[in-house]
Image (spheres, rainbow, N blue to C red):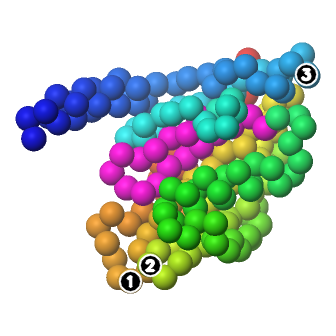
Amino acid sequence: MKLNTPRVLLLSLIIAALSIGATTNLSAQSAQSESNPQWKPVKLKLPAGYMPADFPEKRAGKLLIEAKRPDGMFIVYPKPEDGPEVLPTLLKSMVAGMFFHKDKSQATWTATPLTAHPGIENETGTLYSASNQEMEIQLVSYTRTLGATTVVYGYFAMRHKSGKHKDDASFIDAYGKGVEAFDKFWQSIKESK
């Protein structure tokens, strides 16, 4: 127990330093920047309480994991050669792998279109859902174009099917709303000047 205490304190300090509401440019080199000279990184505010990590698959972007609940957010720059199903397939596999440890390959997803967020132009969204005997998971994915830059961002969460559990995450509603941290996150995504 004594050996874990310094690690917990160090991890807490790192998380606090990284998430103190810092505004950041998500400016990792993107394939979009190589193919389009007008491309600019987006500017956004990292949500409080979420731990930032690099996006998997060596893609330019960030994965943001909630430290206390089974949910997270992401933002990633799609590659120009990506077809329309490349990122959704990658995201569904990633989220199923986080929560469906035994039967992740057998997750059957349903998809429902979402309208653009109020006041946001050039945006499309999809709400994906899957479940097994014990839990249900949700993945919300939006594609937004800001000037010459395209980003895919969203939210994912898990909750138990039987009764309420204290570690259940909140789900987004059919209008793309309902989770305060995600509402602040998508509102903070802006075009760099």
Q: Residue 25's quadrant in the figure?
A: top right
Q: How far apart are marks 2 and 3 (CA)?
A: 46 Å
**Measuring 50% from the left and 41% from the top, which residue is drawn there?**
64
Q: Where is residue 175 in the image (x, y as percent from the top left)?
A: 65, 66
Residue 36 - label: 3
**150 or 147, which lies in front?**
150
Q: Earlier in the sequence, mark 2 or mark 3?
A: 3
- The amino acid sitting under disc 3 is Asn
Question: Does residue 87 appear to the left or right of 82 in the view shown?
Answer: left
Q: Does the magenta stretch include residue 66?
A: yes
Q: Nearer the viewer, residue 30 or 179?
A: 30
Q: Which residue is disc 2 drawn over?
A: 134
Please name the amino acid that badge 2 sits on.
Glu
Q: Does the magenta stretch include residue 111?
A: no
84 or 154, which is in the foreground? 84
Tell me the amino acid under the disc marked 1: Ser
Check disc 2 and report its element: helix, strand or loop.
Answer: loop
Tell me where the magenta segment starts and ends, as one range.
62-78
Q: Mark 1 — residue?
A: 162
Check whether the beta carbons of the residues at disc 2 and disc 1 lie within 8 A of each other: yes
